[in-house]
Image (spheres, rainbow, N blue to C red):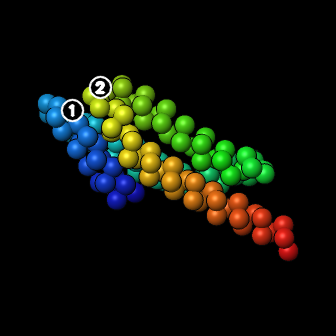
Amino acid sequence: MLFAFLAMGGWAMFANRDHAMPQPLYSGLLQGALSACLTLFLKSVIDALSRRFTGAAGLWAPPVIACLGSASLLTALHALIGTPEIASTIAVPLLVSTSYASIYNYSLSRRKGSDHDG
């Protein structure tokens, strides 16, 4: 969680570096806090969603739903605090979290498939 806070908060500050302080700092603190929380909850969300879907939908739906939920939350909260570069600010955190969600969900689906094979 600390790594997510520092890495993604730092990215948000960098993405907003051309704007007057303290806005890059606020954006960094918000993104850092959100990334830490998303890191904590993403595995649980994918676990729950992967149990709800089967077949092909089981591969794509959990990470897509998690990505859309994260994107909505990040966009709304950054808009609320006035982050100037919202798209740039959330692009890297969303890429990282969606990649993780996709890989983790794929591993769950493979495990489910091997449970049914034997």
Q: Disc 1 designates what residue?
A: 23
Residue extending furthest toward the front: 56
Element carrying mark 2: loop
For residue 33, side relative to residue 97 (left or right) = left
Residue extending furthest toward the left: 20
Quadrant, the C terminus = bottom right
Residue 58 point in image, percent of width and height: 72, 50
The answer to whether the residues at label 1 and label 2 have Cβ atoms under 8 Å apart is yes
Q: Earlier in the sequence, mark 1 or mark 2?
A: 1
User: In the drawing, what numbered circle is on residue 82?
Assistant: 2
Q: Is residue 106 above or below residue 33?
A: below
Residue extending furthest toward the bottom: 118
Res 102 quadrant in image = bottom right
Residue 27 point in image, percent of width and height: 28, 37
Amino acid carrying label 1: it is Gln
- Image point 39% across, 42% down: which residue? 91
Res 65 quadrant in image = top right
For residue 43, side relative to residue 58 (left or right) = left
- Image point 49% across, 32% down: which residue? 72
- Is residue 93 in view from this perspective? yes
Give the Cα distance between marks 1 and 2.
Answer: 8 Å
For residue 103, side relative to residue 80 (left or right) = right
Residue 88 point in image, percent of width and height: 33, 38
Element carrying mark 1: helix
Q: Which of these two is toward me, 1 or 62?
A: 62
Amino acid carrying label 2: it is Gly
- Image point 40% across, 57% down: which residue? 1
- Image point 74% across, 49% down: which residue? 56
- Is residue 29 in view from this perspective? no
Q: Which of these two is toward me, 32 or 116?
A: 116
Question: How crowded is the residue under tag 1: few (<14 C-alpha within 10 Å), some, or many (20+)?
Answer: some
Res 31 quadrant in image = top left
